Image: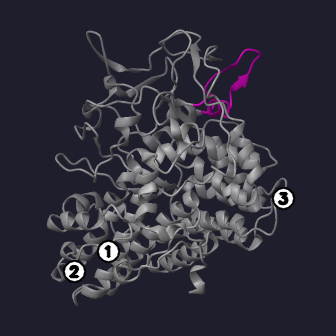
């Protein structure tokens, strides 16, 4: 059985042509005809599967590179950069902010290449291609397109739905579609995809029926707020759908939570029993765009990296640390210990040890002990997705070139979606199944059983600590904003995003830490989230090339 990662890197001429046809600066531009793969390519099952392989990596590269954490975590307030990316940290993202443009471009590249794959398979698949493979490959492309549209509508609101880029050559009237119609489109798409994908992955890393049904659970939970019955209320039909699909995935997928949370990010963790959908990156010397470059920007120092390690000013925020069990407010700051095992697996505290990572020190090398530095400010560095030097991963990494996958959906989310869907519009719930599922996630982190009742705040906090630095927190806030904007603004505006000092009780291997806000850093600690800056502005370059994007949106289904 061929591994998807080998397919991604081993598609030869097809890969190069596929990449060229998707990298237009203008998302509305028709893919160049001379770059479309020759019709003779789609003659075997392997060739058809190769035609969708890069939908798992290359097309997402510009988003995964730096934008995923800039939007998903910096804007959400779970992490910050003290000296870089300040527009996103301070919630002042503009039409010229680099990560804004790269995200928009990447998502529409996913859309465009998915459309191209669907068109080519339908048009060129030869008689030797099995109907099952043809149906699956088209479903994969539709899956990716729907996932991209979920990110587009949640970041920019009204966006144009494009199902056939080839038709755009003669159509200059493309304009944005209403968020409600975008959500209707992507949920109806994913329902069909769930019917066409197999229940078990055809090859490692490929999406399945359960990947699609997991996305449906996520989509319907959010859509319940998009089409809410009133302020603070969610659509009960869609809440019931979220509950239905999440329970189906839990009961029928055959997936299971890893026993230890930290193992989710220890090499080699790819395509494990908890992964419902991951981007499939490949350590590929000499290639660009199929590898995972993100660890280069998150690793706190070259001492643990491969000629990169540029994340020395990136850190958990003060607010994010306050979400973890065991860290409590004091008269002068915060103090606590790592009761929740997810803290150590997500962020590095001074004195914490990570024996899986090699660290260069004066005169030699040791297993990583995160250093204790500074006198009035330091950083709680990013650990999640940091796998270390090449020697730590069997030689499979180099500068800006890592092979570890990026989670796009994990099974633990299904447990928390079920709990939130059951809670629905109630203030609280003591539903025993919801509590059972919640506690499977909660107790895996080493925490005691939560007796209940479950509330929105309890579930929201659990999602924060479960998925911090996985690009999830921002989308949780957008989901909330759909039906309770005031609460979303309140959460964001209560956050402290400024620098602080963390001191261990002893070094190394401390048992507790004291956190103190840096006294001279009194500005830029908070943000002002409001209706005028919550959604991202359409990138300026796109507005200049596609002026129809400035027109009022229309219902996609009223054409």
Outermost residue toward the right in this view:
427
**SS category of the residue bearing label 2:** loop
Q: Which residue is labeled 3 in the image? A: 426
**Residue 113: quadrant of the picture:** bottom left
User: Residues in magenta?
Assistant: 317-340
Which of the two discs, 3 and 1, sits closer to the camera? Answer: 1
Q: Position of residue 531 (x, y in %)?
A: 69, 52
At numbered mark 1, what does the secondary structure look like: helix, strand or loop?
Answer: loop
Quadrant of res 357 = top left
Name which residue lies at 66% across and 30% down: 496
Q: In the drawing, what numbered circle is on residue 30?
A: 1
- The reply to whether callout 2 and callout 1 are in contact (CB within 8 Å) is no
Would residue 352 be counted in the magenta stretch?
Answer: no
- Tell me the residue at 25%/9% (across/down): 363
- 370 on left or right of 130: right
Q: Residues within 10 Å of mark 1 (few under 14, many from 20)?
A: some
Q: Earlier in the sequence, mark 3 or mark 1?
A: 1
Q: Residues within 10 Å of mark 3 (few under 14, many from 20)?
A: few
* 328 within the magenta span: yes
Query: Measuring 63% from the left and 24% from the top, which residue is drawn there?
Result: 523
Give the residue pinned by disc 2: 42
Image quarter (top left, top right, bottom left or bottom right) of the N terminus: bottom left
**Mark closest to the chain's N terminus, 3 or 2:** 2
CA gap, disc 3 and disc 2: 52 Å
Residue at image x 26%, y 76%?
A: 48
């Amino acid at each position: 059985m061929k591994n998807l990662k080998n397919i991604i890197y081993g598609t030869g001429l097809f890969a190069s042509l596929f990449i060229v046809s998707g990298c237009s600066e203008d998302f509305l531009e028709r893919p160049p005809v001379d770059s479309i793969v020759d019709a003779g390519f789609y003659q075997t099952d392997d060739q058809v599967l190769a035609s969708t392989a890069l939908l798992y990596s290359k097309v997402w590269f510009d988003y995964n590179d730096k934008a995923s954490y800039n939007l998903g975590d910096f804007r959400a307030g779970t992490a910050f950069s003290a000296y870089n990316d300040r527009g996103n940290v301070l919630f002042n993202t503009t039409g010229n902010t680099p990560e804004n443009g790269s995200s928009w471009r990447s998502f529409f590249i996913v859309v465009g290449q998915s459309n191209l794959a669907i068109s080519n398979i339908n048009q060129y698949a030869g008689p030797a291609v099995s109907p099952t493979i043809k149906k699956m490959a088209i479903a994969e492309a539709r899956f990716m397109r729907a996932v991209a549209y979920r990110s587009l509508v949640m970041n920019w609101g009204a966006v144009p739905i494009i199902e056939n880029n080839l038709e755009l050559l003669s159509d200059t009237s493309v304009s944005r579609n209403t968020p409600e119609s975008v959500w209707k489109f992507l949920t109806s798409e994913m329902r069909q995809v769930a019917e066409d994908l197999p229940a078990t992955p055809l090859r490692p890393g490929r999406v399945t029926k359960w990947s699609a049904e997991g996305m449906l659970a996520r989509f319907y939970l959010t859509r319940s707020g998009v089409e809410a019955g009133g302020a603070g209320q969610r659509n009960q039909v869609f809440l019931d759908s979220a509950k239905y699909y999440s329970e189906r995935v839990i009961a029928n997928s055959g997936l299971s939570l890893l026993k230890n949370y930290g193992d989710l990010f220890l090499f080699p963790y790819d395509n494990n029993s908890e992964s419902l959908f991951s981007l499939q990156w490949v350590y590929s010397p000499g290639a660009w765009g199929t590898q995972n470059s993100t660890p280069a920007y998150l690793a706190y120092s070259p001492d643990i990296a491969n000629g990169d390690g540029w994340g020395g000013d990136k850190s958990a925020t003060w607010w994010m640390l306050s979400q973890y069990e065991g860290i409590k407010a004091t008269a002068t700051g915060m103090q606590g210990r790592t009761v929740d095992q997810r803290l150590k697996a997500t962020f590095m505290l001074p004195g914490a040890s990570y024996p899986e990572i090699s660290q260069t020190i004066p005169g030699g090398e040791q297993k990583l002990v995160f250093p204790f530095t500074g006198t009035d400010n330091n950083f709680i560095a990013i650990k999640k997705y940091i796998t270390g030097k090449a020697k730590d991963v069997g030689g499979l990494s180099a500068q800006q070139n890592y092979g570890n996958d990026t989670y796009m959906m994990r099974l633990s989310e299904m447990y928390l979606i079920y709990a939130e869907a059951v809670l629905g519009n109630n203030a609280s719930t003591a539903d025993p199944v919801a509590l059972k599922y919640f506690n499977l996630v909660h107790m895996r982190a080493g925490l005691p059983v939560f007796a209940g009742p479950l509330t929105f705040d309890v579930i929201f906090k659990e999602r924060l600590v479960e998925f911090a630095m996985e690009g999830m927190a921002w989308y949780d806030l957008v989901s909330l904003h759909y039906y309770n904007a005031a609460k979303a603004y309140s959460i964001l505006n209560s956050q402290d995003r400024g620098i602080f000092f963390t001191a261990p009780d002893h070094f190394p291997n401390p048992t507790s830490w004291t956190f103190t806000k840096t006294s001279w850093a009194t500005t830029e600690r908070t943000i002002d989230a409001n209706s005028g800056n919550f959604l991202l502005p359409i990138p300026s370059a796109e507005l200049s090339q596609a002026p129809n994007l400035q027109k009022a949106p229309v219902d996609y289904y009223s054409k």
